Image (spheres, helix red, strand yellow):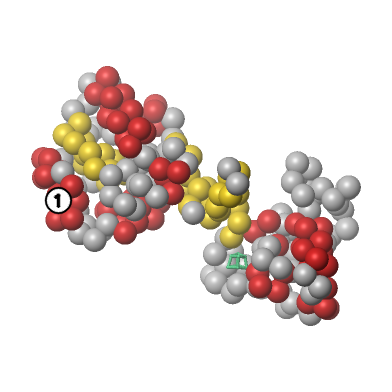
Amino acid sequence: MIITSAKPLEEILALLKDEDDIFVIGCNVCAAKLKTGGEPEVLEICRRLEGHGKRVVGWALPTAACSVRSFESLAQKNEKINEAHCILVMGCGSGVSTVASVTEVPVYGSNNTLSLGGSSEGKLLSGQCIMCGNCTISEFGGLCSKSQCPKGLLNGPCGGAVDGMCEVNRENDCVWNLIYERLKKIKRLDLLYSIHAPQEHGFK
Ligand code: SF4
Ligand code: SF4
């Protein structure tokens, strides 16, 4: 899941200051789950834009903004898109760029894209992966130190953790503590004897 947060309305209005005849596209996957681009949020932004004097020609909620097949597939959901002079996408950056690839009109995004995360048991998990292009997560019990250790350490902890909490961000568990406990539980502490060479993670 791509983690997004909604931009403040003032910022969206500033983006759209020279625009009118706006078509709004939500995203019924990640953004809907995060309440940054599902149907209620789409209807709300339409209402608020109109409240600020903007004409909204229509809206659509494709399954995922990042997998829009074509302009025609969007028009099938709402042909009013043909009247649009610009499009506001309520998805992640990938959704915005995917929509931009199928239309000639200006495309804007209403969200900030924060990280690759997930959700489980009602909890939002952010920053689970930085898409480094060289995945080592299987060697660490399904936990990623590149994304969850602020120092991105690959060969064990820095030694600064206090009571299992990270010295950089004291509200977070030290991921290396979690990795150790996980590997111990699954009887794979042997994996910690492998030495990992430095990687340019984060810079593919
Ligand atoms: S090792 Fe790289 S690809 Fe694998 S989860 Fe971590 S950041 Fe993502
Ligand atoms: S305390 Fe743990 S998570 Fe925090 S920087 Fe050190 S090794 Fe990384």
User: Does residue 125 appear in this view?
Assistant: yes
The C terminus appears in which quarter of the rendering? bottom right
Residue that label 1 marks: 76
**SS class of the residue under badge 1?**
helix
Quarter of the view holding residue 48: top left
**Ligand 1: image quarter:** bottom right
Closer to the camera in the image, 20 or 117 = 117
Quarter of the view holding residue 36: top left
Say whether residue 153 is left or right of residue 14: right
Q: Amino acid at mark 1?
A: Gln
User: Does residue 109 appear in this view?
Assistant: no
Which residue is depicted at the point 38% across and 40% down?
Answer: 37
Q: Position of residue 10 (x, y in %)?
A: 39, 27
* Label 1 residue near ligand 1, CB within 8 Å: no
Q: Position of residue 174 (x, y in %)?
A: 78, 53
Which residue is depicted at the point 18% across and 55% down?
Answer: 73
| Looking at the image, residue 155 lies above or below residue 38 | below
Closer to the camera in the image, 35 or 88 = 35
Q: Position of residue 102 (x, y in %)?
A: 21, 57
Which residue is depicted at the point 31% across and 59% down?
Answer: 67
Say whether residue 203 is left or right of residue 98: right
Closer to the camera in the image, 65 or 134 = 65
Say whether residue 109 is left or right of residue 6: left
Q: Position of residue 98 (x, y in %)?
A: 31, 57
| Looking at the image, residue 143 lies above or below residue 91 | below
Which residue is depicted at the point 32% across and 43% down?
Answer: 26
